[in-house]
Image (cartoon, helix red, strand yellow):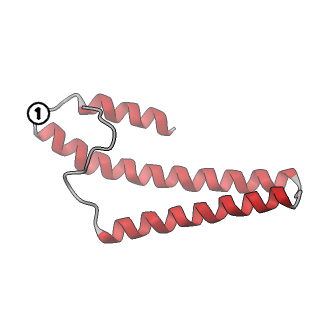
């Protein structure tokens, strides 16, 4: 069941896609800023704070996608009799922590 690049059966709403992409764009901006801070030889503490902020933002995006996955893909698969999806979901939860 765990193929790379599967397609969701329940499409994401345009609003959800927009929100997730906005969050990703902010993370990309943070990463660019971290790169500039390195180029400017900024203080280690300041760089580490920005890295922590970027990691936190990315993890938040991951949790939003995981929640959507649980509410749509996992529910649909269980309703279709595929109980192995629970194992996949648990694996994803472990990877995200």
Residue found 75% across the figure and 58% down from its top = 35
Q: Residues within 10 Å of mark 1 (few under 14, many from 20)?
A: few
Q: Is residue 54 left or right of residue 62?
A: right
Q: Is residue 8 left or right of residue 89?
A: left
Q: Is residue 26 left or right of residue 53?
A: left
Quarter of the image holding residue 75?
A: top left
Percent from the top left, x then y, of residue 79?
12, 40
Instruction: Count how many numbered circles sit on residues in the image.
Output: 1
Q: Is residue 25 above or below residue 79?
A: below
Name of the residue lying farthest toward the left: 80
Percent from the top left, x then y, of residue 70?
29, 45
Q: Is residue 46 above or below residue 79?
A: below
Percent from the top left, x then y, of residue 14?
31, 70
Residue found 24% across the figure and 59% down from its top = 11
Task: Name the residue that disc number 1 marks.
Answer: 81
Observer-nearest of 91 and 29: 29
Observer-nearest of 76 and 31: 31
Q: Quadrant of the N terminus?
A: top left
Residue found 25% across the figure and 49% down from its top = 7
Q: Is residue 56 left or right of residue 71?
A: right
Q: Secondary structure at mark 1?
A: loop
Residue found 33% across the figure and 36% down from its top = 89
Percent from the top left, x then y, of residue 8?
24, 51
Q: Is residue 84 above or below residue 6?
A: above
């Amino acid at each position: 069941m765990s193929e790379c690049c599967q397609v969701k059966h329940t499409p994401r709403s345009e609003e959800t896609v927009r929100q997730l992409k906005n969050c990703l764009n902010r993370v990309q901006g943070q990463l660019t800023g971290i790169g500039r801070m390195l180029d400017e030889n900024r203080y280690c503490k300041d760089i580490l704070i920005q890295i922590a902020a970027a990691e936190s933002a990315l993890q938040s995006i991951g949790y939003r996608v995981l929640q959507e996955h649980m509410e749509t893909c996992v529910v649909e698969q269980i309703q279709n009799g595929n109980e192995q999806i629970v194992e996949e979901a648990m694996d994803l939860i472990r990877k995200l922590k």
